């Protein structure tokens, strides 16, 4: 009996079963190691895909905003050309029905229309004054038609012909909103479009957010086109972009609780698609928040130098010729959390092998 027991242990178990057990244990160990490595590889693959997706999302948002800004620039340029031609063809237009009343330093169109047409810095009207006001009156219809296409994209539009003649759409009570001694030619939205700053005479974007009056109106900047008559600058036409317009332009659902910020010159934060989250992350109030909450604190620049252990990822794009920068911000822990959830769910159903 003892010899049979020894035979089983020595001959069968040691020589046959033990090597098989060793091989199986080794295979299980190797499967575990390769499975772990594959799992890490799959997870890294998902993270890389997420990163590429973010880059694509940032590009799409930038392209969307660029397309709308470019369209506004093209239409502002087209309207500029219409106004320039009106100076030549206004003689064929009967302006006898146009009348203006002088009130608190302004000549204002007596018949209220869709836009306010008014003068500043003059106390009487001569024939040249009436011609300029007639051109503005003729511009009212094409301007209104254009603005109806841009509801939510731009806030308002205006035409300034020198320091004396202006149109503002939509209609405002100029006596309450403006000073009769206002000289538009001294404003950045006017002189930055002249030949000194804009020798190519092209339609440009002029940032306004640092002007002292911009915060109360929430005005980020304007698309401005210079008007030339007989090869001399006669005025400007502009369309204003506000914080609300920016919100509409960038309205898009982003994955992983990501959000967008828009930076102006000097890195000042003009807008965030998630103002609360942005403030929690960086303790900065955007221009949009300061405007909406009527806060008087100065604008702060966004300065952040990501390091290897940073929880944030950034994707930056330039917005057309505006000088504005769009940055998409996401947190790594949010990305990893959702990636892991997707990974384990798909692995459970066999879509990702280990």
Image: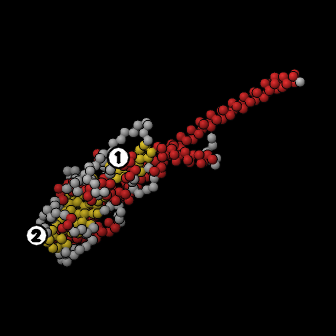
Image quadrant for the C terminus? top right
Q: Relative to 197, is 109 above or below?
A: below
Residue 97's spot in the image, x, y percent? 19, 77
Residue placed farthest to the right in the image? 1
Compared to 135, does 37 lie above or below? above
The outermost residue toward the bottom is 97
Q: Is residue 94 visible?
A: no
Q: Which mark is residue 124?
A: 2
Mark nearer the viewer, 1 or 2: 1
Relative to 264, say whether 236 is above or below. below
Residue in view at x 28 percent, y 54 percent = 295
Q: Which residue is mark 1?
A: 283
- Total marks drawn? 2
The reply to whether residue 148 is visible in this rendering is: yes
Which residue lies at the image location 44% right of the left edge and 50% below the top edge? 258
The N terminus lies in quadrant: top right
Q: Position of residue 266 (x, y in %)?
A: 28, 45
Q: Marks 1 and 2, how far apart in space?
A: 54 Å
Q: Nearer the viewer, residue 110 or 96?
A: 110
Say what secondary structure mark 1 lies in.
loop
User: Measuring 85% from the left and 25% from the top, which residue is drawn there?
Assistant: 5
Q: Position of residue 221 (x, y in %)?
A: 28, 55
**In the rendering, which numbered label is found on residue 144?**
none
What residue lies at 26% left-to-right and 58% top-to-bottom? 216
């Amino acid at each position: 009996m003892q010899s049979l027991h020894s035979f089983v242990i020595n001959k069968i178990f040691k020589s046959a079963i033990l090597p098989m057990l060793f091989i199986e244990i080794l295979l299980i160990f190797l499967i575990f190691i390769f499975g772990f490595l594959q799992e890490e590889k799959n997870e890294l693959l998902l993270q890389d895909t997420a990163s590429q997706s973010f880059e694509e999302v940032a590009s799409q948002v930038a392209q969307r905003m660029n397309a709308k800004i470019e369209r506004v620039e093209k239409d502002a340029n087209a309207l500029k050309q219409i106004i320039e031609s009106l100076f030549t063809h206004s003689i064929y237009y009967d302006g006898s029905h146009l009348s203006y009343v002088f009130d608190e330093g302004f000549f204002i169109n007596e018949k209220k229309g869709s836009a306010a047409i008014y003068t500043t810095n003059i106390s009487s009207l001569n024939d040249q004054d009436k011609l300029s006001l007639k051109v503005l009156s003729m511009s009212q219809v094409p301007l209104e038609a254009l603005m109806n296409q841009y509801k939510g994209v731009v806030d308002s539009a205006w035409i300034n012909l020198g320091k004396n003649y202006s149109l503002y759409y939509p209609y405002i009570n100029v006596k309450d909103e403006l000073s009769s001694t206002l000289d538009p030619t001294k404003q950045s939205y006017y002189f930055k479009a002249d030949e000194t700053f804009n020798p190519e005479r092209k339609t440009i974007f002029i940032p306004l957010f640092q002007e002292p009056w911009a915060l109360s109106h929430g005005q980020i900047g304007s698309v401005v086109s210079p008007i030339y008559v007989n090869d001399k600058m006669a005025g400007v036409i502009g369309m204003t972009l506000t914080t609300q317009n920016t919100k509409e332009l960038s309205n898009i659902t982003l994955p992983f609780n990501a959000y967008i910020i828009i930076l102006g010159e000097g890195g000042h934060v003009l807008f965030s698609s998630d103002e609360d989250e942005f403030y929690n992350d960086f303790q900065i109030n955007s221009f949009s928040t300061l405007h909406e909450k009527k806060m008087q604190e100065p604008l702060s620049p966004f300065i952040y130098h990501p390091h290897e252990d940073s929880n944030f990822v950034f994707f930056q794009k330039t917005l057309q010729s505006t000088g504005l920068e769009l940055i998409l911000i996401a947190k790594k822990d949010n990305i990893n959390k959702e990636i892991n959830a997707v990974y384990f769910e798909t692995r459970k159903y066999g879509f990702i092998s280990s």
